[in-house]
Amino acid sequence: PSDNTSALVEEEDASEAWLKVLAELSAEEVEFNIQEAERADKARQMQEWGFESSLIASVLGVATDASLEDSDEVQGMQAYRETSYLDEVDLQTVESHSTVEKDEETGEPLRTQM
């Protein structure tokens, strides 16, 4: 019986250790995401205020253009993006009701609820 008890205690200790490690990793990830969000917000603000891209990149260490994203792009990706399912919509001028799916027969908006 004492072997079973000690094995159970060791198993619980190992489980607690894993939970502690997972909690620490989760906390580190949350902190990292907060810092990255703040840095991205600062970069966005600097762009709005008219700072040059090179200055933003050197101060914050962030890329302010998409040139690196396209450098190792697979063949055909640009064509896919141009014909993708995502429509270019000017959110300043579009009215929300015009983007809702409508029934072909009645023309009424489809209402689906979960």
Image (cartoon, helix red, strand yellow):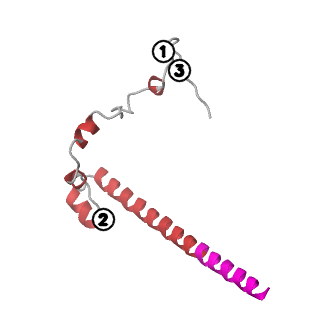
Tag 2, which secondary structure? Answer: helix
Amino acid at the residue labelled 3 = Pro
User: Marks 2 and 1, how far apart in space?
Assistant: 51 Å
Give the residue displayed 64% in from the left and 75% down from the top.
15
Q: Are marks 3 and 2 in contact (CB under 8 Å)?
A: no
Q: Which is nearer the eye, 42 or 4?
A: 4
* Image-based side of 72 in relation to 95, left or right: left
Q: Of the numbered discs in the image, which one, if any, rests on residue 60? A: 2
Give the residue displayed 55% in from the left and 75% down from the top.
21
- Quadrant into which the N terminus falls: bottom right
Q: Nearer the viewer, mark 2 or mark 1?
A: 1
Q: Is residue 54 magenta?
A: no
Residue 26 % position (x, y): 53, 67
Amino acid at the residue labelled 2 = Leu
Up-down: is 105 above or below 23? above
Can you identify the residue that label 1 sits on? 104
Can you identify the residue that label 3 sits on? 109
Residue 101 % position (x, y): 48, 24
